[in-house]
Image (cartoon, helix red, strand yellow):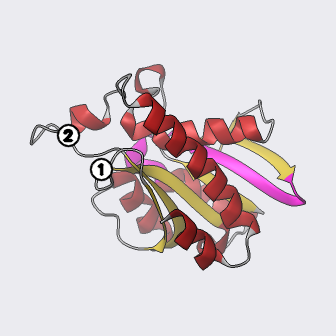
Amino acid sequence: MKIIVGLGNYGKEYEKTRHNIGFEVIKELADKLNISDFKKKFQGLIAETTYKNEKIILLMPTTFMNLSGNSIIEAINFYKLDSKEDIIVIYDDMDLPLGKMKIKKQGSAGGHNGIKSIISHMGTQFYRIKCGIDKPTEKGDTINYVLGKFSKLEESDVKNMINKAVEASLELIFETNKDKVIGKYN
């Protein structure tokens, strides 16, 4: 059993914002896996399926970004999973150019409050798919930038990145050589 978590902020006003790229990946993954029914559980929205004989749970925490770890730890404890091998977290990263993606197995929060929350609950070792959203052009405008929507010009790069993140998350589940997957997408 694996849990794929997409980070974001819950609510209409946050849909399709840079900070919600993790939610967008989960929605695209749900479409790919023919999942249409999310339910409220573990302080989030979850959906379950079996794909290639592996049970996969998709999770979008509804705790808001800064408390994402609360939702994830509930799911980990309920299913008795190993955070080092069974959890993949997908989120936005301002240190990567728009459309670029990077996979890591462990590391710091890098200033991301959602990841800080997760680390506080389960440590630094879990798979991460970081989706590049670039930095704001104006200094000190970080909050407005991450809560802003992508421009029409950015949409193609964002869509391609979302599709790559979907592929990468499934490959991390099914490929036994995780370093091969990491190398492919980095």
CB within 8 Å, label 2 to label 1:
yes
> Callout 2, which amino acid?
Pro
Task: Tell me if residue 62 is in the magenta stretch.
Answer: yes
Which residue is outermost to the right? 53
Answer with the quarter of the image where residue 77 lies. bottom right
User: What crowding class fits label 1: few (fewer than 14 Cα within 10 Å), some (14-19), or many (20 or more)?
Assistant: many
* Residue at image location 33% in from the left, 54% down from the top: 96
Q: Secondary structure at mark 1?
A: loop
Residue 143 position, x and y percent, is 23, 37
Counting residues from the start of the chain, the first of labels 2 and 1 encountered is: 1
Residue 133 position, x and y percent, is 35, 44
Query: Taking the image as drawn, is residue 42 in sight?
Result: no
Answer with the quarter of the image where residue 173 lies. bottom right
Instruction: Judge by depth and name the residue closer to the eye, 46 or 49.
Output: 49
Q: Which residue is mark 2?
A: 136
Residue range highlighted in magenta: 51-68
Q: Which residue is mark 1?
A: 94
